[in-house]
Amino acid sequence: MMTILKKLTYAIVAISLITSCGSKKSDDPRDILSGSTSKTWHIAKQTDSNGEKDKLTDKEKDEKLNLYADGKFSIVDDKGTATGTWTVEGTQKLTLQFADQPVTENFSITEMEKEKIVLKAGDGSEMVLKPE
C-alpha cells in the first residue's frame, strides 16, 4: 500500500512539473517583451563578441528600452530619445527599425523570460536585459 501511495505521489508531482513548464512556454513573446501596454528594460549585463564581460558605464546603466504593445519603441539615453517600431519572430528574433533612419537592429533571442531577456547581436556580443 505504501509503495502505491509513493508512486502515485511521484506521478502527481511529475505531472505538476510538466504542466507548469508547459504553461511558461505558452506565454506570448509580445506580452513578455511589452506587457499589456508597455515595458521598460535596462541592460543588466553585457559581453563582447569574444564572450568576455563588458563593464557597463554609468550612462549605459541609465539607458532604457521602452517596448510598447502597439509595436513601437523608444530608447532613452544621455543623448536623447530614439524611436521606431519593433517586431518579434517567435522567441528567436527581435528587430528594431528606427524611425526616419535606414537603420535596423536585429538580435537573436537566446533566452526569454518575464524577468530576463538575453539578446545576441550579429557580432556575437550579448546583452542581458531586465525590466524596471
Image (cartoon, grey):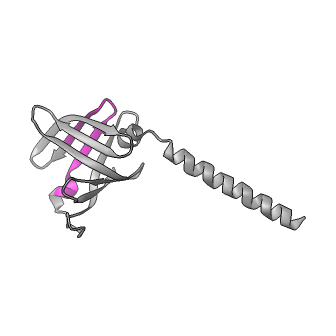
Instruction: Name the residue at 22% across, 53% down.
Output: 121
Look at the image and say whether residue 63 sits in the magenta stretch: yes
Does 38 sit above or below residue 52? Answer: above
Camera-nearest residue between 92 and 129: 92
Q: Quadrant of residue 94?
A: top left
Residue sitting farthest toward the top: 70
Q: Which residues are magenta?
A: 60-75
Residue 108 rendering spot, x and y as whole percentages:
29, 50
Q: Quadrant of residue 33?
A: top left
Camera-nearest residue between 129 and 2: 2
Residue sitting farthest toward the bottom: 52
- Is residue 117 toward the left or the right of residue 26 in the image? left
Camera-nearest residue between 79 and 110: 110
Instruction: Name the residue at 90% across, 64% down.
Output: 1
- Is residue 48 toward the left or the right of residue 87 in the image? left
Instruction: Name the residue at 27% across, 52% down.
Output: 42
Residue 53 rendering spot, x and y as whole percentages:
24, 69
Does 85 sit above or below residue 55? Answer: above
Residue 90 rendering spot, x and y as whole percentages:
38, 41
Does 84 sit above or below residue 61? Answer: above
